[in-house]
Amino acid sequence: MLIHHYLEENAARFPYKDAAIHLGGRINYLGLEAAANRLANQLLKLNLHPGDRVGILIESSINYIIAYFAILKAGGIVVGLNSQGTARDFRNILSDCSVTGLIIGKNAVPVIKEVYHDIPSLRFVVAEDRAEHLPKDIRALSLVDIQLSGDPARPQTSRQETDPAQIIYTSGTTGKPKGVTLSHRNLHANTSSIIRYLDLNAEDRVMAILPFYYSYGNSLLLTHMAVGGSLVIDGRFAYPNVILEIMAQERVTGFSGVPSTFAILMHKSNIRNYRFEHLRYITQAGGPMTPALTQKIMEALPHIKIYIMYGQTEASARLSYLEPEKLLEKIGSIGKAIPGVELTIKDEDGRICPPGKVGEIVAKGDNIMMGYWNNPEDTARVLKPDGLHTGDLAKADEEGYLYIVSRSSEMIKSGAHRISPKEIEEVIAEFAGVIESAVVGVPDEILGEAIVAYIVAKGEIDQKELRKHLRANLAPFKIPREIYQVDALPKTESGKTKKYELVEKYKTKARA
Amino acid sequence: MEAVQQIRNFILENFMIGRPAEELGDDDSLLDKGIIDSTGVLELVSFIESNFGFTVEDNELVPENLDSVNRIAGYIGRKKNS
């Protein structure tokens, strides 16, 4: 199964059914198929070759979905990009995958003007609205014009299931972004499995607040396109009450979020004033949620099934889930492997751990990525003959339910983001006077983890200037909430920074 | 300093570093222009609460009150007069 066949099949099965709804706009499956075909035909006219990478830099919207399926239909590989990225991020990512073309929204125009000269492989840009804002020395087209005059016939391209369909960039522990490369088969295996355990069907309508460039948001997009369901897209979760109102109006059956989504809903919204008669389930992934927060959701939405899930971008999204019926009995567990996936806990010698013993989660299944784009070293580090080494440490109980104990990597999970401390430390190091720094994640009720930086420097650091430097070089969600100048960082005998001590120190201070 | 200027400064210094002040129109939607996200709104709320001396209630967290410089200034004015 190729991923764009989801759209093609449902355009035949449910031509007039809502495929996506966004800010008052609606598109049915037939309209979405025609719009994606028009853009795909234009990409082919631009001489897109099979396997060429095309980036999407548009906020989650109907146009994002059109762009996504058009790239696949034209035989290309989708690279969904975080619209909050900085010029530095885009230079790194777009050069790494030698992007051929970009499809961009109006907010992305300034940053693309800044970087396009540094991406020699970039041949064209399709602007969501008008193309005349783009520089004259780049081939620029308008999506509006393409939709007005393009050819709606389905293009004929040939791709195999084993060909790459999508690259999702994640922050690597080294600070350099890593392009998780997923084939049509990887994505289809995961999509089918999620559909099975969530029991999704064509009547399902999901509230999609998570960005589509992120693997969790991407899985909402694919599962609903596969079953012929509807996506109610709204990126305004900054105003949670607006989202609650849309959920009620659009009669959504599903809602998906990360721990901070639910923390905001429980602490900063009117959720308790709603009954949501059509809501059937909610899903949570993207980092551990505290049992206290889970309990609050159960109280606020007593008739709703709550699915706790675990996964990695490297697994196309999902690896395990906890059945809603087991939520109270197994609170704190990430459940068991999803259909089609095998999860084992292994010790450092590769032996399977008995119940209760902590080891690394190793995953096998058709959903496991092909590898990191253009990066055999990092690929070899995680993809081994026995499967994907997740870096997450866990133990199983006697019944096989898994409990995460710690993440062996130092990645910070803040809000919906997975953040590399190394990347932030590298930017801090560029600031005059800095000797060294350590960036850690500390517990935060809303975000899950908040970023805190400890800096050793010559003389007094001007915090205001340092923040300016960080803002100029890091996406907003990567900016440390607190910065402390210290005389020295705690070190192990081998000279490694003892980050857990910094976290403990912070927690002790917070309690005092 | 009048409220509009204080709000402008806060947004420019916290969410728009390195971008020219002219890019922020007083009626521009902070969300549509990609200036603010869900954590940004929470930062904005604590700025308003600590600088203008009142609590932002959960049901007041709506774009009509917070999504542009002028809307924030109007909301602050209404709260202070209530």
Image (cartoon, coloured by chain):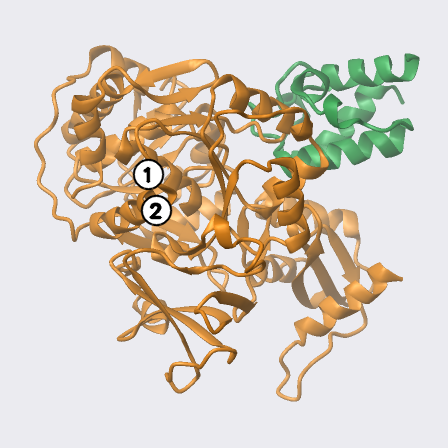
Within 10 Å of the Cα at label 2, are there few (<14), some (14-19), or many (20+) other Cα atoms? many
Q: Label 1: chain?
A: A
* Res A303 seen here: yes
Element carrying mark 1: helix
Residue A30: x and y, percent? 22, 18
- Please tell me if label 2 and label 1 are on a single chain: yes
Q: Chain coloured green: which letter?
A: B
Residue positioned 73% across, 23% down in the render: B59
Residue A40 is left or right of residue A455, and the answer is left
Q: Residue at x 77, y 74 (%)?
A: A488
Between residue A216 and residue B78, name the one nearer to us: A216
Residue A138 showing in the rendered view: no
Chain for mark 2? Answer: A
- Count up the numbered dots: 2
Locate residue A291, reporting x and y percent. 64, 54
Q: What residue type is labelled 2?
A: Ile
| Up-down relation of residue A128 to residue A340 (above or below) | above
Q: Which of marks 2 and 1 is nearer the N terminus?
A: 2
The tint chain A carries is: orange
Q: Is mark 2 on a helix, strand or loop?
A: helix
- Name the image quarter holding residue A267: top right
The quadrant of the picture occupied by the N terminus of chain A is: top left
Residue A484, relative to residue A267: is it above or below? below
> Where does the image place residue A179, in percent across and percent down from the top left?
36, 54
Q: Label 2 belongs to which residue?
A: A194
A509 or A380: nearer the eye?
A: A509
Three-letter amino acid code at the position of disc 1: Thr
Residue A464, percent across and down?
77, 47
Reading the image, the residue beneath label 1 is A223
Using residue A286 as the reference point, say whether residue A168 is left or right of it.
Answer: left
Task: Name the mark on residue A372.
Answer: none
Q: Give the Cα distance between marks 2 and 1.
A: 7 Å
